[in-house]
């Protein structure tokens, strides 16, 4: 399903409640300054979602072991309402974070209106239990939360738990497997989430992986899918501007290949972009490269 450029609406949702006050709150401004709207030929004005970043609390909540759970819930509801509004207007939401906790607002909103799948591009599994997380950052447990694992304040907004079923999730590009073992995270590979790790991509090639992933996605019993693009899935040497770096990763060409094939074959409801920290890329070239990569996916 090709997305018409005229239908794209950019939503700036620069919440860092699930991470730290490190710079990812500048992601949207950075990509917009690098020409994202112009590259996509977006005609609609950017929607800016008010954040609660000024209320950020670095002390973990004693009941949930998470940072800022009530603030994240409140922000998620606000973001979710914007997502639903954009979709009802017949537009394609492109949500610029912020950190990965914005996915809670997105997927809970989609669950209100139907059954949606999730295509998750991320270097990390984001599958920690709060009590196993060394930081309490919801950005390292967002995939667990949207699939129903974690405290009810985040997993069960509007009694909609889970926002997406395991079998309707595809994870691409994980390369933190050793780290998850070290810190005692749940093993995402033991769930019903379909995983294509970076090891598998390196061994088999992106073409063979996508030849297996696409038929799986097309068989999902969902109305449409959401794409979540955490920029740390990109190789560290081409995008070191992330808070949690790992060696290896996808090239821009591989990300474009994945996204282009998905957009051409699958009904996609929207896309989120997260965790790029422009303060770690002062020359602005990485932002320009990300803009060009995203833009190329929407070229005919």
Image (tube, rainbow, N blue to C red):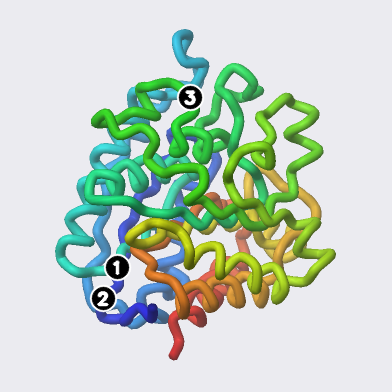
User: Which disc number belongs to residue 92?
Assistant: 1
Q: Nearer the viewer, mark 3 or mark 2?
A: 3
Q: Earlier in the sequence, mark 1 or mark 2?
A: 2
User: Which disc number belongs to residue 275?
Assistant: none
Q: Residue at x 38, y 28 (%)?
A: 154
Label 1 sits on a secondary structure element that is strand
Could you tell whether 59 is left or right of 188 in the image?
left
The percent coordinates of residue 211 (x first, y second) are 65, 73
Q: Nearer the viewer, residue 200 or 81?
A: 200
Q: Quadrant of residue 253?
A: bottom right
User: Which disc number belongs to residue 150?
Assistant: 3
Bin the neighbour count of mark 3 within 10 Å (Cα to Cα): few under 14, some 14-19, many 20 and up: many
- In space, the residues marked 1 and 2 are separated at their CA atoms by 6 Å
The percent coordinates of residue 167 (x first, y second) are 51, 47
Label 3 sits on a secondary structure element that is loop
Q: Which residue is mark 2?
A: 7
Residue at the limit of the structure toward the right, as seen here: 203
Bin the neighbour count of mark 1 within 10 Å (Cα to Cα): few under 14, some 14-19, many 20 and up: many
Determine contact: label 3, label 1, CB under 8 Å: no
Could you tell whether 155 is left or right of 45 in the image?
right
Label 2 sits on a secondary structure element that is helix
User: In this rendering, does residue 194 appear at all?
Assistant: yes
Q: Quadrant of residue 178?
A: top right
The percent coordinates of residue 288 (x first, y second) are 55, 73
- In space, the residues marked 3 and 2 are separated at their CA atoms by 35 Å
Position of the N terminus, as image quadrant, is: bottom left
Residue 2, relative to residue 218: is it above or below?
Answer: below
Bin the neighbour count of mark 2 within 10 Å (Cα to Cα): few under 14, some 14-19, many 20 and up: some
Position of the C terminus, as image quadrant, is: bottom left
């Amino acid at each position: 399903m090709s997305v018409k450029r005229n239908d794209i609406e950019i939503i700036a949702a620069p919440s860092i409640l699930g991470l730290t006050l490190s710079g990812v709150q500048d992601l949207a401004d950075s990509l917009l300054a690098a020409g994202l709207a112009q590259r996509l030929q977006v005609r609609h004005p950017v929607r800016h979602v008010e954040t609660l970043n000024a209320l950020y609390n670095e002390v973990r909540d004693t009941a949930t072991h998470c940072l800022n759970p009530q603030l994240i819930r409140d922000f998620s509801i606000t973001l979710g309402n914007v997502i639903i509004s954009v979709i009802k207007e017949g537009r394609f939401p492109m949500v610029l974070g912020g950190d990965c906790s914005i996915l809670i607002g997105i997927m809970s909103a989609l669950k209100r209106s139907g059954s949606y799948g999730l295509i998750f591009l991320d270097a990390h599994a984001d599958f920690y239990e709060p009590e196993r997380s060394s930081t309490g950052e919801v950005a390292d447990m967002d995939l667990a939360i949207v699939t129903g694992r974690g405290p009810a304040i985040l997993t069960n907004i509007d009694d909609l738990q889970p926002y997406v079923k395991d079998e309707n999730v595809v994870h691409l590009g994980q390369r933190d497997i050793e780290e998850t073992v070290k810190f005692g995270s749940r093993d995402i590979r033991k769930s019903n989430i379909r995983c294509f790790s970076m090891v598998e991509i390196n061994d088999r090639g992106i073409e063979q992986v996508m030849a297996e992933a696409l038929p799986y996605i097309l068989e999902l019993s969902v109305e449409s899918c959401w794409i979540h693009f955490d920029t740390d899935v990109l190789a560290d040497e081409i995008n070191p501007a992330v808070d949690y770096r790992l060696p290896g990763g996808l090239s821009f060409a591989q990300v474009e290949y994945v996204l282009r094939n998905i957009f051409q074959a699958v009904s996609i409801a929207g896309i989120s972009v997260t965790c790029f920290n422009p303060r770690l890329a002062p020359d602005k070239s990485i932002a320009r490269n990300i803009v060009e990569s995203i833009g190329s996916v929407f070229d005919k």
